Image: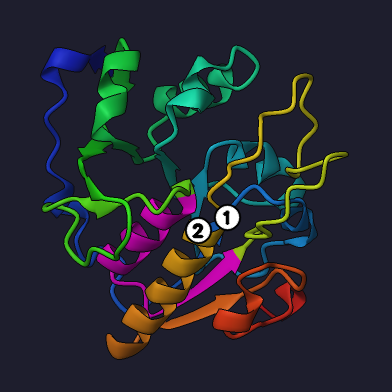
Amino acid sequence: MRRSMKNSSNNIRSLKRRHQGEVGVVLANGPSALSYEKKSDSIVHIGLNASPLLEERCGLSLDYYVLTDRRFLQNPEKRPIADTMLERDTPCILREELSADLTKTNDNTFFVRSIGRDGFSTDLESGFYFGCSTTMLALQLAYYLGLKKIYLVGVDLKYKPEQPRFYMEKVVEPNDPFTSVQVWNFSNAYQTLKMLDVDLFLCSEESLARPYIPFLDVKDI
């Protein structure tokens, strides 16, 4: 069911600890995401940006969808991906500022405000740190859901000119000049989650974040 934005007032609190003690995969958009295959129905899958394009290939249906980057909605090639997710019943967690770019949402749409660039929020009711990467909201959501073990898939952080993302783009989105900021925030997320007794693994062998997060081959998830 779709509804107008003015009636969208879901409280993110309803998602808190919904998957306490479970295992989750954050499915990002780097080329290495193409190597992932779902092996268990018990895994919680959190997608972002163009991740829905991986559902058929990877044999899965996203449990959550995250979006923070206004450029994704402004791109006529990519906008339909987000619109399709907002028409489904999949819970969608969006940066609050994006509400101005949408006319309708589903009954499971949640808006979360950004409270800064660098950091890791353990309480999405208070907001999230954007870290110059949509994956950062997905990670903070994963913790908020209560996941005990989290695998990062497709977090390559290497934007190769010929194919910076797992999907082909007619007009390639310019690379972010904030890779160092992204790496710092992923490293900080690992350290924070470690103190909170949550396991985080990186499943991209060539990722720039590999020196800071334990690596696990995607085939071993």
Closer-to-camera residue (195/2): 195
Q: Which residues are magenta?
A: 135-152
- Using the image, tell me which numbered label, if any, was put on residue 83: none
The residue depicted at 35 percent of the width and 80 percent of the height is 193
Residue 145 is inside the magenta segment? yes
Instruction: Determine which residue is flagged by label 2.
Output: 182
The C terminus sits in image quarter: bottom right
The x and y percentages for residue 84 are: 51, 23
For label 2, the SS is helix
The x and y percentages for residue 83 are: 47, 20
Residue 190 is inside the magenta segment? no
The residue depicted at 38 percent of the width and 33 percent of the height is 89
Q: Check disc 1 and give the amino acid type.
A: Thr
The x and y percentages for residue 118 are: 32, 59
The answer to whether any part of residue 106 appears in the image is no
User: Which colour style is shown?
Assistant: rainbow
